[in-house]
Image (cartoon, rainbow, N blue to C red):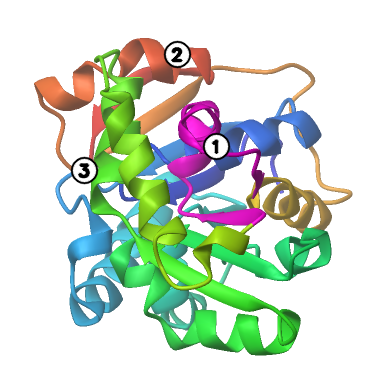
Amino acid sequence: MAADHPVLFFDSGVGGLSVLAAARLLLPTAPVIYAADSAGFPYGTRSEAEIAARVPALLGRLVERYHPRLVVIACNTASTIALAAVRAALDIPIVGTVPAIKPAALASVTRTIGVLGTEATVRQPYVDDLAARFAADCTVIRFGSADLVEAAEARLRGESVDPARFARALAGLFDQPGGDRIDTIVLACTHFPLVEADLAAAAPRPISFVDGGAGIARRAAFLTEGQRWPSAPSDGVAVFTRLDDRERKLAPALASFGLASLVEL
């Protein structure tokens, strides 16, 4: 494989930047295409049928255009709903993103963990299965917050975000029965690690936050082990399915993640 074949990161918005940051630590010279389905954003309030139809079709177009060596679906909602369909449709390695329930269960002392994601993610049977397999001795409390996704996007656009929005998202977990015992929270949306410091500041007590970024990066590195890479880092490209003023305001933040140009699919 030619050294310039990129790794493609895909999300509904800019949440996947948290995964890209982890991957760059292990694959520092990897060419990168970051694709955001801004025309379909946010996924968390869409139906399973919409996501299951939209994601494979979009990734098919992106793979045809950019010829990546690997696709990372850096979105919990898209992965829990459409990962199997994408793998069936595309003949290249696909790395998905799933809630980090296993490491959270290993870390929890109180045996009560929270799962903070989108509304679509937290209701998925996939999450039931992860909880049954890896946290059977834990109480697992879930909450879906569409507003927290929007807050993370606003933060990356450089806008001021009311701290009360982070407190409300956490209250969705803490105010449920047994929520006072939560000591570890799974950030089950890739947007949420981007505002982890805000969540920690809004928490009423010290809380450990866990996300899957590092594990996804390790998987991407493993699947590309031994392949040729460029000798030096290069600027990446951010691709949007809709590119208007809202997306253009993200340019400074995208540049800080090594994405120097914005284009429309």
Give the alpha-carbon distance from disc 3 to disc 2, as whole Å.
Answer: 18 Å
The spot of residue 249 in percent (x, y) is: 22, 16
Amino acid residing under circle 1 = Ser
Query: In this rendering, which labeled residue sits more in front, label 1 or label 2?
Result: 1
User: Could you tell me if residue 216 is visible in this image?
Assistant: yes
Q: Nearer the viewer, residue 125 or 18?
A: 125
Foreground pick, 73 / 212: 212
Alpha carbon separation for disc pair 1 and 3: 17 Å
Residue 71: assigned label: none
Locate residue 136: give its quadrant. Answer: bottom right
* 10 Å crowding of disc 1: few (<14), some (14-19), many (20+): many
Q: Which mark is residue 255?
A: 2
Is the C-beta separation of discs 1 and 2 under 8 Å?
no
Magenta segment boundaries in residue numbering: 183-209
Q: Which mark is residue 18?
A: 1
Q: Is residue 216 left or right of residue 218?
A: left
Q: Residue at x 42, y 41 (%)?
A: 15
Circle nearer the N terminus (3, 2): 3
Amino acid tagged 2: Ala
Image position, residue 27 (x, y; %)? 76, 34
**Residue furthest toward the right?**
226
Is residue 95 visible in the rendered image? The answer is: no
Look at mark 3 in the image and give the residue it sits on: 38
In space, the residues marked 1 and 2 are separated at their CA atoms by 14 Å
Identify whether 55 is placed above or below 4.
below
Is 229 on the left-hand or right-hand side of 204? right
Nearest the viewer among 165 and 119 is 165
**Mark 2 nearby-residue class (10 Å; few <14, some 14–19, many ≥20):** some
* The quadrant where residue 260 appears: top left
Residue 170 inside the magenta-drawn segment:
no
